Amino acid sequence: MNTQPVTHTQNAAEVLTEVHGHVGLITLNRPKALNALSLPMIRGLTKCLLDWREAPAVHAVAVRGTGKTGPFGAFCAGGDIRFFHQAALASDDALEQFFTEEYALNHLIHCYPKPYIAFMDGIVMGGGMGISQGAKIRIVTERTRMAMPETNIGLFPDVGGGYFLSRCPGHSGEWLALTGETVGSSQALELGLADTRFESARLASAWAALGSANFDREGAVDQWLTLFSNAPADVPNGHLEQIDHHFSKHSVSAIVHSLEADQSVWAQHTAHTLRRRSPLMLHVALAQIRRARQMTLAEDLRMERDMIHHSFHPGHMKLSDAQSEAVEGIRALAVDKDNAPRWNPSRIEQVDETMVTPFFTSPWTPLTHPLRDLD
């Protein structure tokens, strides 16, 4: 076994790589931050995957996170939102670089020519979904807690969220995108966001067994999966019919009013959740999911790159960068931690199309777009 930490940045220890047998193994190693992605981590992951893509001796790649007590226990909690906040207030170009390089990495994973296996144990949110949803094999456990919670911080479900959420059954993609609700392993499987379930106690054995698996041999992947997969123990959500009924409505206002008219505990909880999210970004996210249903992955990522630019540069609303929903949402959740964001507009019914449409207007031409090279 040859352990090779990525060494091109001073934060190299945050991404560890090794080749065991014919499998490239990646460990996200930032446990105190729940492996939240930094720009150096994105660059380390990209370099590693590009190197292994061309390496004949590497037949497959697997990725896991490090928890507070060792490997596994936490996959990735998303992007480093404290960095987003600081960079936005400082007008730091690194923020633009972060999203361009992150989305390019998401595309690389979705299109990777070799089997890419994601061990989605523990927290899998935001950017963690971006580096796992493109995997050939997406493994969840009884500890998996999966979500795209961006509307809670004044953003939208990016990292290809428009693409993979819009392909969930019925209108469950709208539900996940708008509410940011967390799902466990059974519902992740039910919604098409995972492929198989392992017991967390057997993850170390499954990881070690990859080194002796011959992924060039027909049936090797299935044999490995059969050895470690098990049926889900937790019960799926059971609200898909209600989700389709309410989240198929034509607008955010119609969705919320429909939920508020439904006296069930689930509907009232869901309506209350939506009333706490950024009203503006709820409208933006709904439009994103519905547009993305007709898009390729590359088209969706280019759209999301446009959207994230406008999220941090809300000039179309005559606001400064420091007044964006994203800066305010991150302040309330992670900086001041008062959990009292001052959304603008403050109510869902106050958002109109003139506020939403500019998010989908690219600030670049097709030839100058930062993601123009994605296929």
Image: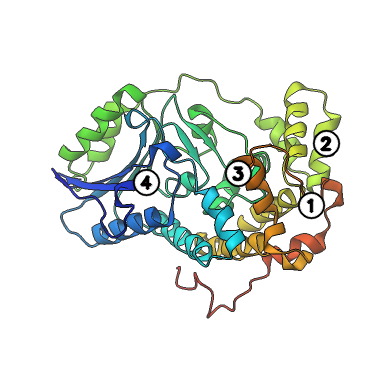
Q: Are marks 4 and 3 in contact (CB under 8 Å)?
A: no
Which residue was labeled with disc 4? 136
Q: Are marks 4 and 1 in contact (CB under 8 Å)?
A: no
Which residue lies at the image location 73% right of the left edge and 43% below the top edge?
A: 341
Q: Quick check: can you spot residue 323?
A: yes
Q: Earlier in the sequence, mark 4 or mark 3?
A: 4
Q: Quadrant of the C terminus?
A: bottom left
Q: Is residue 297 above or below residue 257?
A: below
Q: Earlier in the sequence, mark 3 or mark 1?
A: 3
Which residue was labeled with disc 2? 258
Which quadrant of the figure has residue 169?
top right
Q: Quadrant of the N terminus?
A: top left
Which residue lies at the image location 66% right of the left edge and 28% below the top edge?
A: 239
Label 4's element?
loop
Q: Earlier in the sequence, mark 3 or mark 2?
A: 2
CA gap between label 3 and label 2 equals 34 Å
CA gap between label 4 and label 3 equals 36 Å
Tag 2: amino acid: Ser
Which residue was labeled with disc 3? 335
Which residue was labeled with disc 1? 344
Q: Where does residue 312 sit, x and y in percent of width and height? A: 64, 61
Q: Are marks 1 and 2 in contact (CB under 8 Å)?
A: no
Q: Earlier in the sequence, mark 1 or mark 2?
A: 2
Q: Where does residue 46 sit, x and y in percent of width and height? A: 35, 59
Q: Residues within 10 Å of mark 2 (few under 14, many from 20)?
A: some
Tag 4: amino acid: Lys
Q: Earlier in the sequence, mark 2 or mark 4?
A: 4
Nearer to us in this view, 326 or 139: 326
Apparent side of residue 339 relative to residue 85 in the rendered image (left or right): right
Label 2's element?
helix
